[in-house]
Image (cartoon, grey):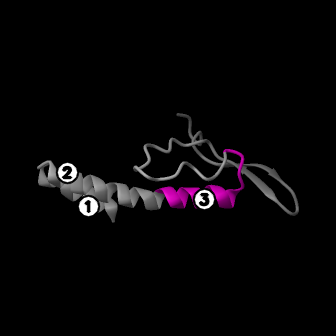
Amino acid sequence: MQPGAGSCAVTAASATSVDITCPIACIGRRPAGLDAARASVACDLGAYLAEAARLAGASVDAFRILRDELRAHGAPKKLVRAATRRAG
């Protein structure tokens, strides 16, 4: 990947607004029960950041579920601790 290839960039600016374009990132697998993305590809920055925050919050639940499943299946304690740390 070239330097800056994964970065957001200002694509237009005026006295009243700024357009910022960000590459579409891989979202990953959503936990069971989490609704599909609420923001569209062509959305404003606030909606994009709100969706990113929502997915970050969902990842906490996903790591807690993973931790519990690892325990239930007798996984090594190192893996259970790692999932616990990621859950925050």
Report helix, strand or loop for mark 3: helix
Q: Mark 3 = which residue?
A: 49
Q: Residue at x 54, y 48 (%)?
A: 36
Q: Which mark is residue 84?
A: 1
**Three-letter amino acid code of the residue under disc 1:** Thr
Q: How crowded is mark 2: few (under 14 residues within 10 Å), some or many (20 or more)?
A: some
Report helix, strand or loop for mark 2: helix
Q: Mark 2 = which residue?
A: 70
Residue 21 position in % (x across, y down):
70, 47
Q: In this view, does 37 lie above or below 2?
A: below
Q: Residue at x 61, y 53 (%)?
A: 38
On the image, which quarter does residue 6 sit in?
A: top right
Q: Give the range drawn in magenta.
A: 41-55
The answer to which of marks 1 and 2 sits earlier in the sequence is 2
Main SS class of the magenta portion in the image: helix
On the image, which quarter does residue 51 sit in?
A: bottom right
Residue 36 lies in the magenta stretch: no
C-alpha span from label 3 to label 2: 31 Å
